[in-house]
Image: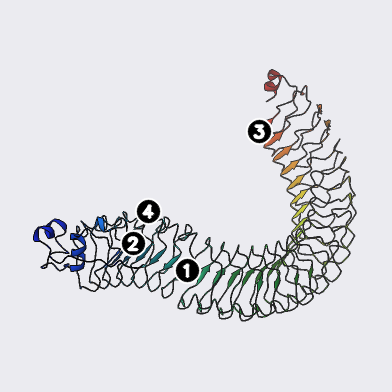
Amino acid sequence: MDTDIILMDTNISTSTIKSHNKYFCNRESPYYNQEICELLCNNAEKDEIDISDKALTILPRDLFHGLEDLQLEKLNISGNKLSTLPKDIFKPLDDLRTLIIESNGLEYLEPSIFYDLLQLKELDLSKNKLTALSKDIFNGLQDLCVLRLNSNELKYLEPGIFDDLLSLNDLDISGNNITTLPKDIFKNLKELRYLNLCSNKLNNLNISKNRLATLSKGVFNDLKNLQRLYLDSNKLDNLESGCFDGLLHLEWLSVKNNGLTTLSKDVFCGLENLEILDLGSNKLQNLEAGCFVRLSQLEWLSAENNNLTTLSKGVFDGLENLETLNLNSNKLQILESGCFDGLSHLKWVSVEHNSLTILSKDVFCVLENLKRVDLDSNKLQNLELGFFNGLTKLILISIKNNNLTTLPKCVFIGLENLRRLHLESNKLQNLESGCFDGLSNLERLSFKNNSLTTLSKGVFNGLENLRRLHLISNKLDNLELGCLNGLSKLKLLSIKNNNLTTLPKGVFDGLENLEKIGLESNQLQNLESGCFDGLSHLKWLSIKNNSLTTLSNGVFSSLGNLQILHLESNKLQNLEAGCFVGLSQLQKLYLSNNKLKTLSKDIFNGLQSLRILNLTSNGLPNQFLSSRL
């Protein structure tokens, strides 16, 4: 700002000096300044005062009293030997726009020292010896645009210290001893354009939720000890080559929720120690071959929620130690053969919520260490024979919410280590005999929400280690005798929400280890005598929300270990004498919401372990009910 030229009157009386200022107009004072004195005595205006490089060791609390009429906009007190400043020293300077206190020996500042400087736009506290700053020290400085804290001895920054700096666009904290930054410390700095954190001891840096539009080459130079860098929720649309130079020890980089459209070759060059890279929620349309070269230590990579339509051959070259790859929520229609080349250590790949209609036979064949593959929410119509060739270490496959209509015989051959198979929400209408061949160690199998109408005999042969089988929400109207053969270790069977009308005797033969059966929400009208034979270990049975009208004598007699029985929401009108015979371990019996009008006298005889009996919402009178309990 240009300084006005002012003509001074040098004939100043002693009385004038005393009345205006005892510091700047006192020749015996170390603060004597003829120019300021003349300004005061002539009631002149001056936009700048410079008392720098005077070797001052202290500033009196009332040093600037009497300067109110100068309408001072800039004050420079740099290059002195000040170790602290009085609490209210700047109170008379409410017009101040620029305050420079750099190159002193400041060790401490009062929390309220800047409270009256509401119009301040630039504050320079650099090159001092500050080790800490109060959380409230910048309160009220909503017009501040430039803040320099560089070259101090700051070890940490209080959470919320920058919350009032709504106009700040230039912040320099370089050359301190900061090792970490609190979460969201920059969250209110919506106008921030320049941030310098060089030459600290940071091992974790979070500058998410700002408005950074670009990262120039060398911006992170000197942050050689940085281990984590978070750039989420900014406006980055490009990463310049060299922008990560100097981050030799970086292990975690997150650039989520920006506007990146592509990644150029060598963009991550220099990050040889990077282990985690998150590129989720950008606008990536393609990945250039070579964009991940030299990330030999990378173990986890996410490019979910982008606009990728294809993966070309060799796109992941250089990621020989990658273990987890997340490609969910893109627009992938095809995975080119060879796109996963080089990922010999990959253990988990997830390609959920894309538009895949077909997978080539050999797309996964190079992933010999793969343990989990997620293909949910695509448009897959079939699985080719040999599709899983070479994946001998697979533990989990999930192909939920696709358009599969059938499973060919031997499609899972070679997956002897598979433990879980999820095929929920497809359009499967039947299961071919032999489609589960090779799955000798499978423990969980789910077909929930498909269109299966029947299960043929021996369809689950070979699943001798299966523990859980979910057939919920299909269209099953019949269970053929022998359809559950070979499931000797099954513990949970859920067939709820189907169209079953009856359970033939012997349908559960061979399930001697079964502990839970869910048959709720079918159309069962009666239970054949002996339909539960062989289920000696069953503990939980639910047949609620069916159409049962009666329970025959001995229908549960083989369930000696049953503890919980749900029969609510049926159409039971009659309970035959002896229908609960054999249930000596039963603890909870639910019969609510039926049509029972009467109960025989000894109907609950033998239920010596019963703790809870629910008969509500029937037609039973209270007196009759209580006499039976």
Provide the secondary structure element on which disc 3 rests. Answer: strand
Horizontal relation, residue 25 to residue 160: left or right: left
Provide the secondary structure element on which disc 2 rests. Answer: loop
Residue tagged by mark 1? Answer: 194
Image height check: is 517 above or below 78? Answer: above
Residue 149: x percent and y percent? 37, 68
Whether residues under marks 4 and 3 lie with C-beta atoms below 8 angstroms apart, the answer is: no
Of callouts 4 and 3, which one flags the residue occurring earlier in the amino acid sequence? 4
Provide the secondary structure element on which disc 4 rests. Answer: loop
Camera-nearest label, 2 or 1: 1
Quarter in which the N terminus is drawn: bottom left
Please, what is the three-letter code of the amino acid marked with disc 1? Tyr
Horizontal relation, residue 386 to residue 314: left or right: right
Residue at 64% x, 62% y is 281
Residue 392 visible in rendering: yes
Say few, some or many: other residues with alpha carbon within 10 Å of mark 1 (under 14 / 14 to 19 / 20 or more): few
Whether residues under marks 4 and 1 lie with C-beta atoms below 8 angstroms apart, the answer is: no
